[in-house]
Image: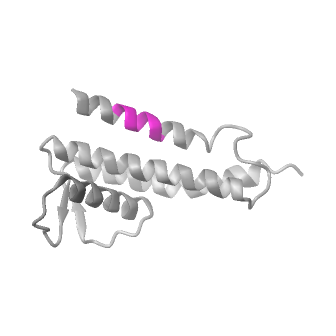
Amino acid sequence: MGVYFSILVIVFCIVLSLRELFIPDKIKGKKVSAENFFVLAIIYATVMIGFGLIYFLIDSEGHPVLVEEEYIAENDVLSKVETCLYFSAITLFSVGYGDISPIGIGRVIAVVEALVGYTIPSAFVARTVFDQKI
């Protein structure tokens, strides 16, 4: 039960982070600024860590979500967290090296994460361009 609650909390945090792209006056008027870059970096970090933790929590419940091309004998928690965060990052940024593949419910989660990864930059650009004060 605690794992499912944790997943809900993580999803809530991801949604709140993405919400920053759609709230008026959260992204300042200048197209390029350190503050806008920082906001975008925080949104990406929240989404990446959130999805990585979702992969880890589901895997820790006994439902495999990721298969590594080269199996690592170390099966400790830190190694699993590292693998989940790594897979989350390469999925979010659409790199997809192919050394780790999602299976089962992990495929659905990876598709959602990739979709979010594609929409963050376009939402950010649309937000900064359309909200310019002329």
Question: Which residue is located at x 58 percent, y 58 percent?
Answer: 121
Q: Which residues are magenta?
A: 8-14
Vertically, is 98 above or below 19? below
**Residue 11 lies within the magenta run:** yes
State the image coordinates of residue 73 (x, y, percent, origin top left): 10, 66
Depth order, front residue of 123/15: 15
State the image coordinates of residue 33 (x, y, percent, origin top left): 74, 59
Vertically, is 81 above or below 4? below
**Residue 82 lies within the magenta run:** no
Q: Is residue 125 visible?
A: no
- Could you tell whether 129 is left or right of 73 in the image? right
- Could you tell whether 30 is left or right of 77 in the image? right
Question: Which residue is located at x 74 percent, y 61 percent?
Answer: 32
State the image coordinates of residue 38 (x, y, percent, origin top left): 63, 55
Depth order, front residue of 26/131: 26
- Could you tell whether 29 is left or right of 60 in the image? right
